[in-house]
Image (cartoon, rainbow, N blue to C red):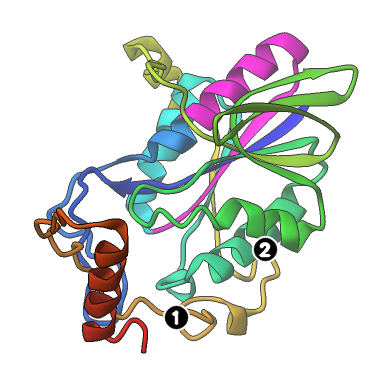
Amino acid sequence: MDIIVCLKQVPNTAKVKMNQDGTLLRTGVPSILNPYDHFALAKALEIKKQTGGKIKVLSMGPTQASEVLRLALALGADESYLLCDRAFAGSDTWATSYALSCAIKKLAPYNLILCGQMAIDGDTAQTGPEIAGHLNIPQITFCTDVKIKNDILTATKLIEGGHQILEASLPVLITLTTPHNFILPYPSFTDIFKGQQKPLFTWTPKEIEADSSKLGLNGSPTRVSKIYPPAPKQKGQIFNLSSEDTASEIVKILQAKKVIK
């Protein structure tokens, strides 16, 4: 079983700040492995233990993103790959997924691609599905569990009010959401030392044969113009009127706010 896990290093804070050009401000902010990706790695290790095979971890980011790849190697991943070049800087989800899909093609063959549901610094949940689109393979999103038996994958997908049990043939891309109370694994000192002996490769657009015009800010069809917290909720109004009079008052309020005419 050949498994590829996509990882992202993210700021360890809910207060994300941006540079003037719309790129993420990382200076002075501690970084961690995105928790959803951490869970995806944990599931990959579980599947490897059952089926054997190899786990390759892949990330895109600055040099410091190698820290999350080293963590993955210490936990049991076999090989790691970092897409690191100024050409990747400022990529939106589409440009990011394009670059990652180019790298995945280079890492082929693969049976399974695992991604976190979303990154906590962006919350878009777009990159995983877009990778599947670039690779033209099936995808199942928002999964809490995944199992493989006889080359058939069974995924438990979180839906409103419950779960769906879905099956897919390989290869397939799965995005995972962390179940309630799941404890993310961390390596021992011995495992960290062993992880330092495993290969970590750094690739540029040239190595993955990517079209540079589709990378970075210039290759991104979307831009972040502003990030700001939502306005605090205002105290609501209570009407002690009849149903007809209440409906009339609501219409007047909506008209005053120009929601309706």
Foreground residue among 240 and 19: 240
Indicate whether 9 appears above or below 219. Answer: above
User: What kind of element bears circle 2?
Assistant: loop
Kind of residue at disc 1: Leu
The tag on residue 217 is 1
- Taking the magenta stretch, the answer to whether it contains residue 53 is yes
List the single residue furthest toward the left.
Answer: 235
Q: Nearer the viewer, residue 160 or 114?
A: 160
Bounds of the magenta span? 39-61
Residue 140 picture location, percent across and down: 70, 41
- Residue lying at 47% horizontally and 61% vertically, measured from the top left: 84
**Cα–Cα span, label 2 and label 1:** 19 Å
The N terminus sits in image quarter:
top right
Label 2 or label 1, whichever comes before in sequence order: 2
Circle 2 is placed at which residue position?
208
Helix, strand or loop at disc 1? loop
Which image quarter is the C terminus in?
bottom left
Position of residue 184 in the picture relative to residue 46 (left or right): left
Q: Amino acid at mark 2?
A: Ile
Query: Which quadrant would residue 170 be assigned to in this image?
Result: top right
| Front residue of this view, candidates 128 and 193 | 128
